Image (cartoon, rainbow, N blue to C red):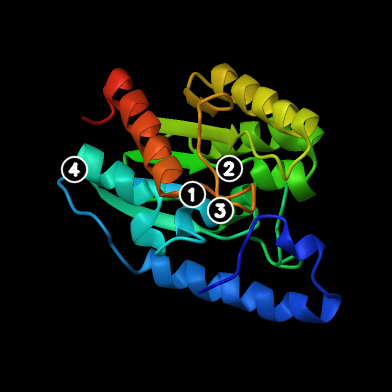
Amino acid sequence: MLVAAAGLWLVIGRDEVPSQCQATLDARQQVLAERFTSGDRTIAVLGDSYTQGIGLLGPQASWPTALGILTEAEVVVDGVGGTGFTSRGFCTDEPVAYGERLDDELPDAPIVVVQGGVNDALSGTPDDVAAAAADLLADLEDVPTVVIVGPPDAPAADAAALRAVDAGLREATEDAGRIYVPLLDAGIELQSDKVHPTGNGQWRIGQLVAAALQTAGGAG
């Protein structure tokens, strides 16, 4: 199983980084080509290792799959482990931060969900998250429904950094008139690595996003 734990690149040797980067890029292409749910409408997800179901059975155990089941939609996933709004994770020289991936190709879907923030707290720049998220949301201005999903309470990350990321994402999302789904204090159950959600935690994220879409009239 791909080891793409958020923040793991901070502790591995420099000579391991290229192979870890290639593994995350390969995993991205694999998941982009697969569909774990189906439906009459399409939801595009941009995210990190959470979308890969790391530590579980894989993407079929991730929150985007739960979202697709709950909303009866086809979910297309673009996930790269270790990345975020201000973090490239293992791939320091590749354009894989969220905004950079959107610069490469915009999702072809009426609903786009962008989930992240833990990696920005672990290895990114929390103070720059609001500006990065604002730029990303500007790129998505023509998409009818956009949802930003923030980071959960992850003990592996600094609590103050997580709060700064959450505040930055909330500010940018509200300024753009989009939907923000906070995960801090949402009871997201995590695995023993204190970063990645358990199966129950993944399902809970899917439920929260589905509820936000239903409230907004974007799905349901």
Residue 141 in sight in this render? no
Q: Which residue is mark 4?
A: 72
Label 1 environment density (alpha carbons within 10 Å; few <14, some 14–19, many ≥20)? many
Q: What's the residue type where badge 3 is placed?
A: Asp
Q: Which residue is mark 2?
A: 116
Label 1's element? strand
Label 3's element? loop
Q: Residue furthest front?
A: 192
Label 3 environment density (alpha carbons within 10 Å; few <14, some 14–19, many ≥20)? many
- Asked if 158 appears above or below 21 in the picture, the reply is above
Label 3–label 1 contact, CB within 8 A: no
Q: Which residue is mark 1?
A: 46
Label 4's element? loop
Q: Residue at x 43, y 37 (%)?
A: 205
Q: Position of residue 162 (x, y in %)?
A: 71, 33
Q: Residue at x 57, y 33 (%)?
A: 150
Give the Cα separation between the discs numbered 4 and 3: 23 Å
Q: What's the residue type where badge 1 is placed?
A: Leu
Quarter of the image for residue 116 reads top right
- Asked if 130 appears above or below 155 in the picture, the reply is above
Please tell me which residue lies in front, 40 or 7.
7
User: Counting residues from the N terminus, which is met first, the one under dot 1 or under dot 4?
Assistant: 1
Give the Cα separation between the discs numbered 1 and 2: 9 Å
Q: How many marks on residues? A: 4
Q: Residue at x 69, y 26 (%)?
A: 168
Q: Residue at x 16, y 48 (%)?
A: 39
Label 1–label 4 contact, CB within 8 A: no
Q: Which residue is mark 3?
A: 48
Q: Position of residue 203 (x, y in %)?
A: 37, 42
User: Counting residues from the N terminus, which is met first, the one under dot 3 or under dot 2?
Assistant: 3
User: Counting residues from the N terminus, which is met first, the one under dot 4 or under dot 3?
Assistant: 3
Label 3–label 2 contact, CB within 8 A: yes
